[in-house]
């Protein structure tokens, strides 16, 4: 049985614990500094718990003793400390961070990894699954041109001017809205401003907007540098959201007072577990001298698991990290050092017992493959998007 220390007993941590415990293959110990959170997760999931202050190296080391793997479901700023503790304990490390600087620091720690010890940040939805999808599509053209990644965790029933509900980490949300964004434009790696690059698109008859946010590309800028003309990531929202956030973040300068922005959002914007995750990835490139477009689009809704209703963002985030851990344990990933999301095989991911939550049997899925300009366009079956025929 693989022994896991899960740090963080919040919304995502509870889902991770549920998925791992239900397999019977993982011995899960949950650590958190909140007695209330530990009591709740022990009651609902039936896991062992331990009080841990991640600011204390001694408490972290004690919790890690005898564990094969540590999962950080904590706010991003705790992760470098947890990675250092994992290195010292000889445990492999996985996290959910979207923060670019945090990933750089974890990568520096990974350079000192022992044989058989891996460090894999950014294992959730975006970065995470969307990076695996984008890399998979990029491999299906002979010469890559553009990669566009769009992801949104949205309320199923939007209300109010923001048309948004809190569904995950408020710290992470603010980070995405306020920090610079990586991109590749005309073959050059650049930084672009958050909340800019505005666009609209339709999926399944619904109009959405999308705009630059930080962190969603993960390490793809590095991996595709020199191979792609344009690469960008944007967050998906219902129409009108971006203008409201620009007012808060830019005009009222709350990007400079993030604690106040967090307080405002958490006191005024309700949480919801009735949500939908939208992923929309489009790649263009050349095959047999022809410019073609490949698209993978999915909608994943909240659902009942283990007799409880779980939100779509809980399911997709937890499924992403649980799948790559499961693949690591099964020997399907590189065995040592720093691992990127694009190192994960797409087929193996969807075939995994956790990755299946992204598959067509669970998710609503829309996909198409066409040549740019509309010369040849066709609807594909669910299976075709994974194995589309040669053009």
Image: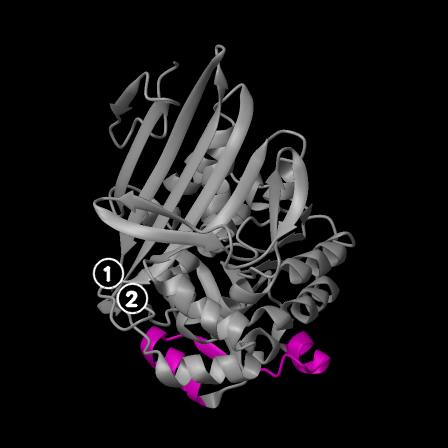
Pointer 2: what residue? 310
Mark 2 or mark 1: name the one nearer the start of the chain: 1
Query: What residue is rendered at 54% in x and 85% in y?
Result: 33
The magenta-colored residue range is 36-62
CA separation in Å, label 2 and label 1? 6 Å
- Where's residue 265, x and y in %? 42, 79
Q: Residues within 10 Å of mark 1 (few under 14, many from 20)?
A: some
Q: Nearer the viewer, residue 364 or 162?
A: 162
Query: What residue is rendered at 39% in x and 14% in y?
Result: 390
Say what secondary structure mark 1 lies in.
Answer: strand
Residue 59: within the magenta? yes
Question: Measured along the vertical axis of the image, is residue 215 above or below residue 295?
Answer: below
Say what secondary structure mark 2 lies in.
Answer: strand
Q: Nearer the viewer, residue 160 or 64?
A: 160
Say which quarter of the image contains residue 237. Answer: bottom left
Residue 303 disc label: 1
- Where's residue 278, x and y in %? 34, 51
Q: Is residue 358 left or right of residue 34?
A: left
- Where's residue 240, x and y in %? 34, 62
Q: Residues within 10 Å of mark 2 (few under 14, many from 20)?
A: many
Question: Measured along the vertical axis of the image, is residue 108 above or below residue 364?
Answer: below
Check the image and name the residue furthest to the top: 288
Q: Badges 2 and 1: C-beta atoms under 8 Å apart?
A: yes
Query: Is residue 330 in view from this perspective?
Result: no
């Amino acid at each position: 049985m693989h022994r896991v220390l899960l740090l963080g007993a919040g919304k995502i941590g509870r889902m991770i614990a549920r998925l791992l415990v239900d397999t019977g293959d993982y011995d899960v110990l949950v650590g958190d500094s909140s007695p209330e959170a530990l009591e709740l997760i022990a009651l609902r999931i039936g896991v062992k718990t331990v009080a841990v202050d991640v600011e204390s190296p001694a408490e972290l080391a004690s919790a890690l003793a005898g564990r094969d793997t540590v999962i950080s479901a904590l706010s991003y700023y705790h992760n470098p400390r947890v990675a250092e503790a994992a290195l010292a304990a000889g445990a492999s490390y996985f996290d959910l961070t979207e923060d670019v600087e945090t990933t750089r620091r974890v990568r520096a720690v990974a350079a000192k990894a022992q044989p058989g010890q891996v460090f894999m940040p950014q294992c959730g939805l975006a970065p995470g699954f969307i990076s695996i999808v984008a890399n998979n599509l990029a491999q299906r053209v002979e010469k890559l041109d553009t990669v566009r990644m769009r992801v949104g965790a949205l309320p199923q029933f939007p209300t109010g001017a923001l048309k948004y509900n809190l569904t995950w980490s408020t710290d992470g949300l603010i980070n995405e809205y306020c920090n610079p964004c990586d991109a590749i434009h005309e073959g050059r790696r650049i930084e672009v401003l958050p909340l800019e690059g505005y666009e609209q698109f339709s999926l399944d008859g619904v109009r959405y907007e999308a705009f630059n946010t930080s962190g969603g590309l993960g390490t793809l800028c590095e991996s595709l540098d020199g191979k792609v003309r344009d690469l960008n990531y944007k967050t998906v929202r219902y129409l009108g959201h971006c203008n409201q956030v620009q007012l808060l973040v830019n005009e009222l300068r709350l990007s400079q007072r993030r604690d106040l922005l967090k307080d405002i959002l958490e006191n005024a914007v309700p949480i919801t577990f009735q949500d939908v995750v939208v992923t929309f990835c489009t790649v263009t490139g050349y095959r047999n001298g022809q410019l073609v477009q490949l698209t993978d689009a999915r909608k994943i809704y909240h659902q009942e698991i283990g007799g409880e209703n779980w939100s779509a963002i809980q399911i997709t985030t937890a499924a992403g990290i649980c799948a790559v851990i499961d693949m690591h344990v099964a020997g399907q990933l590189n065995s040592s050092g720093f691992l990127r999301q694009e190192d994960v095989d797409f087929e193996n991911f969807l075939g995994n017992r956790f990755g299946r939550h992204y598959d067509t049997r669970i998710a609503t899925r829309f996909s198409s493959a066409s040549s740019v300009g509309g010369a040849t366009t066709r609807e594909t079956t669910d299976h075709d998007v994974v194995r589309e025929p040669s053009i």
